[in-house]
Every structure is written in C-alpha cells, then in structure tokens.
Amino acid sequence: MLERVPNAEEMTALVGRPLFDVWIALCAAIDEKYDMDRLWNSGGRAWTYEYKYRRGGRTLCALYAREKAIGFMVIFGKEEQAAFEAEREQYSQRVQAVYDRAKTYRDGKWVMFEPTDLSMVDDFVRLLALKRKPNRK
C-alpha cells in the first residue's frame, strides 16, 4: 500500500490531461456498477501506480499509471475465458486483438489494455461483468 496517494494534479502531470480524463471516466463507470474496496499500490517495475478494485479477497480489475500512459488489467479464469469466447463478436476488434495477444498463465489470462481514449470503456464494463455481476443498481 502506498504511504501517500497521488492527487488529481499529480496524476494529471504524470499521465497528461487526456489520459487522466480517461482514467476518471473508467473509474466512474466501475464505481457506478460495483461497490468495491479500492487500493493504491506501487506499480512495480513497469508502472508508477496501481489502483486495484477488490472485494472479499478477490480482485475485479486494476488500473495502472506511468508517464504518459494508463493501463487497465483484467485477469480471466477458465470460466471467464469461455464466457468471453462465447460472446467475443460483441466486443470491438481492438478488445478482441488485445485479448488474443494476452499471455495465459496457470492462474488465468492476464489481459492488459492501454486505453488512449474513451472508446473501449463500455467494453471494459462488459468484460468486468464476466468476472463478477455488478453489485450496484
């Protein structure tokens, strides 16, 4: 866990205004559908920050930030991969391509998107529903 959470000015300076707007919109879309714990952490070697959505010891997704880039990661277990494959045509070509390139590990398929605009936010929310039904109306 981070000792000090970055504020909006620091995040804007790190990723830039357009990407910070995408970050805010994505967080708002997730918050609208899910009541989750939100945890800030160091982003490891590749990222400056990690912002994770968790509940009951299970991670829904994580957002990442570094200089001039943001990331959105979802890890799909076997059942979630099957659910995605069953409805893959309902997702944009970009989402399908990133999913197809993602590496599958023992614990699931780790899919990292690096959005540059708002075009995939609706797809992201639908992907999250494969992992966990929304718990807000």
Image (tube, rainbow, N blue to C red):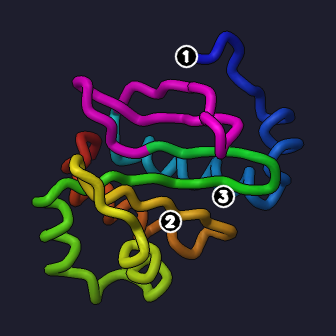
For badge 2, the amino acid type reads: Val
Position of 46 relative to 87 (above/below) = above
Whichever of labels 3 and 1 marks the residue nearer the N terminus, that label is: 1
Please report the residue visible at 19 percent of the width from the left and 78 percent of the height from the top: 85
> What type is the residue that disc 3 sits on?
Val
Q: Distance between the residues labelled 3 and 1?
A: 24 Å
In the image, is 7 to the left or to the right of 136?
right
Q: Residue at x 52, y 64 (%)?
A: 113
- The answer to which quarter of the image holds residue 125 is bottom left
Q: Within the image, what quadrant is residue 116 found in? A: bottom right
Q: How far apart are marks 2 and 1 (CA)?
A: 26 Å
What residue span does the magenta drawing correspond to? Answer: 36-61
**Disc 3 + disc 1, Cβ < 8 Å:** no
Nearer to us in this view, 128 or 43: 43
For the stretch drawn in magenta, the main secondary structure is: strand
From the viewer's perspective, is 105 left or right of 26? left
Queried whether the magenta region covers residue 46, the answer comes back as yes
Q: Earlier in the sequence, mark 2 or mark 1?
A: 1
Residue situated in front as seen by the camera: 52 or 109: 109
Q: Residue at x 37, y 64 (%)?
A: 103
Q: Do the residues labelled 2 and 1 touch (CB within 8 Å)?
A: no
Residue at the front extreme? 106
Q: Mark 2 points at which residue?
A: 121
Which residue is tagged 3?
A: 22
